[in-house]
Amino acid sequence: MNVLITGATGFLGGALLARIGGMERYESIYLLIRSGKGSDTAAKRTKDLVKKLFPPRMHVSMLKKVVAVEGELTKPGLGISAENRQMLVANLDQIIHAGANTKFSAPLEELREINVRGTKVLLDLGAEGRQKGRFKRFDYVSTSFVAGKNAGVVHEGTLLGKRDF
């Protein structure tokens, strides 16, 4: 089984990678990852992430299993090359979409770009893979910040009609 994870450099995405990395059922784990500043390529950031998340005894095997796919949720077509897109469409069984902008003070258009349009492009990628007979599953991790200014335990029904942010 082959999976693409978005948001792997974030807290939750990194935790997902750490958890599924050791699972034998995952043959390849692709990470949509943007290049950093300077000489920080997507491949280097992926290597650094693997070294941070996994014990030294697993580094060699994980660096074979975890593959950087340079891209960014805010760019058209995720900013991935045509070659990488074809490879993903042909090989992906699953997408775990944990990438998002959770800065709620960001301009609405900026939030839409990554949280809505980026998600749609990933759904389209999965749909294309499904048409080819391979892709099976899309897991979407949504924001957990829905309680506004409410304090303590906030039950879902409590929020109805009370949205003081």
Image (spheres, rainbow, N blue to C red):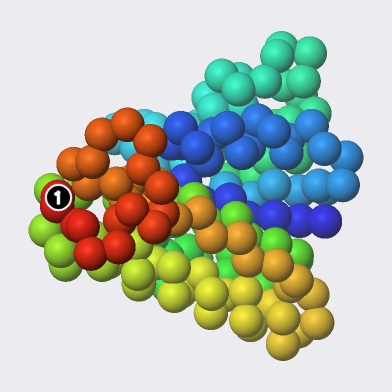
Q: Which amino acid type is shown beneath numbered disc 1?
A: Phe
Residue 88 visible, this angle: no
**Above or below, comparing residue 154 to residue 38 in the picture:** below
Residue at x-position 71% and y-position 12% = 56
**For this rendering, which residue is in front, 131 or 160?**
160
Name the image quarter holding residue 134: bottom right
Residue lying farthest to the bottom in this orientation: 131
Q: Quadrant of the N terminus?
A: bottom right
Residue lying farthest to the front in this orientation: 158
Residue 125 visible, this angle: yes
- State left or right for residue 96 relative to residue 64: left
Q: Secondary structure at mark 1?
A: loop
Q: Residue 52 location, x and y as percent? A: 56, 19
**For this rendering, which residue is in front, 147 or 9?**
147
Residue at x-position 23% and y-position 41% = 150
Residue at x-position 67% and y-position 20% = 54
Q: Residue 22 location, x and y as percent? A: 79, 32
Residue at x-position 36% and y-position 42% = 154
